[in-house]
Amino acid sequence: MAYDIDEIKKIGIGLIGFGIFFTFLGIVLFFDRGLLALGNIFGWQGVAILLGWRSLWALFTNRANYKGSASFLLGLFFIFVRWPIVGIILEIYGCVFLFSSLIIVEGDLTAAS
């Protein structure tokens, strides 16, 4: 196979999958705060395992990403203080802003192959 995934990366992908599942379930069940919090914990642990802690820290503390970092962390705060709809909206905006450069690069790589 051209690209082998080691066991740690498989665990990270699994955690991201659990995060997406719990977040989706939390939204479907009328923005259940506990499920949304579990989705956040699982998802970001998976991202941290895939990228590495230093890369994740660099992603959040990069000056160009302050807007996305602040909106994501504010959304996480709103979920924990029982305003899940506002929290999810802020988190989605923050994730799109944080990973927008990654999405553009991925699109270019897909178009090139």
Image: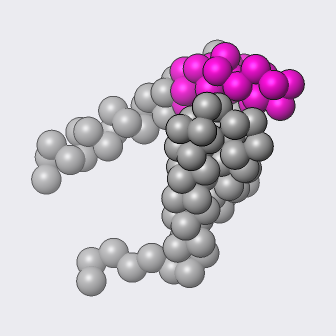
Please, is residue 71 above or below residue 58 in the view? Answer: above
Q: Residue at x 52, y 64 (%)?
A: 13
Q: Residue at x 81, y 25 (%)?
A: 82
Query: Would you identify the image quadrant in which residue 77 lies?
Result: top right
In the rendered image, the quadrant that contains the N terminus is: bottom left
Q: Residue at x 49, y 27 (%)?
A: 96
In the rendered image, residue 102 lying in the magenta stretch gets the answer no
Question: Most prominent secondary structure in the magenta stretch?
Answer: helix
Q: Give coordinates of residue 20: x percent, y percent.
A: 53, 49
Query: Would you identify the image quadrant in which residue 59 lies?
Result: top right
Q: Give coordinates of residue 104: x percent, y percent.
A: 33, 33
Quick one: which residue is furthest to the right in this view? 81
Quick one: which residue is furthest to the front in this view? 29
Query: Would you identify the image quadrant in which residue 61 lies?
Result: top right
Q: Using residue 89 as the reference point, say whether residue 45 is left or right of it.
A: right
Residue 99 or residue 20, whichever sits in front: 20
Please, is residue 109 above or below residue 72 in the view? Answer: below
Report the number of discs: 0
In the rendered image, residue 94 lying in the magenta stretch gets the answer yes
Please, is residue 10 above or below residue 97 in the view? Answer: below
- What span is colored magenta in the figure? 70-95
Q: Give coordinates of residue 57: x percent, y percent.
A: 73, 42
